[in-house]
Image (tube, rainbow, N blue to C red):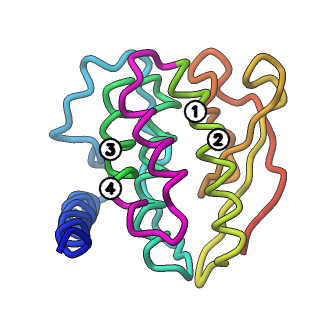
Amino acid sequence: MKTITGLVLTLGVVTLFAACGNTQKSAGTDPHEGHNHAATEGHNPAVETTVAGVSIKDDKLNAVYQHYIHLKTALVGSDLAEAKVAATAIELGTKELTNGAGLTALAAKIGAATDIEVQRTLFSDLSNDFIARVKQSGLTSGEIYVEYCPMALNDKGASWLSNQKDIKNPYFGDSMLTCGEVKETIK
């Protein structure tokens, strides 16, 4: 019963996010119309917010990946509150993944964090797990880029996944937005 309730809740959240992301806009309209970004300094509308064209073979991982991109985008924009929202969605979705307990715990910590730098540090571990899972699953369409910044985490370096080759660094946000490089392309 607990699994069914969790599955229903997860599907509801995924459906909600999918429905919000599938509104069609005509060319020249603001894709963020109706969203309150006034509290977000340095908001960059060019930052990737969708996973259009990318499909991971593992359907459950594919559903959670949408929220991973949401989290990455929130960190790029240095948006603590939005990162919490994305982390909560990841936490719900990862409960349905095989051996997802580690991801669930990391997402819960990101959601509970009250400091963006703590979220960014935890995002590195979350990303490493996601990278391994996406590589193992493979894609049915699109490309996902493994990007890397050698200066992240006090010069220890850290990776993340992206749907675009352009670097939008989640570890530094606006202060070093384009620091990093594409290390690998997953097809």
Residue pointed to by mark 1: 122
Helix, strand or loop status at disc 4: helix
Residue pointed to by mark 3: 88
Helix, strand or loop status at disc 1: helix
Q: Amino acid at mark 1?
A: Leu
Q: Is residue 163 left or right of residue 29?
A: right
Residue 87: mark in rendering: none
- Cα separation between marks 4 and 3: 6 Å
Q: Amino acid at mark 4?
A: Leu
- Cα separation between marks 4 and 2: 18 Å
- Cα separation between marks 1 and 3: 14 Å
Mark 1 and mark 3 residues within 8 Å of each other at the beta carbon = no
- Cα separation between marks 4 and 1: 17 Å
Residue 92: mark in rendering: 4
Q: Amino acid at mark 2?
A: Asp
User: For residue 41, what is the image quadrant?
Assistant: top left
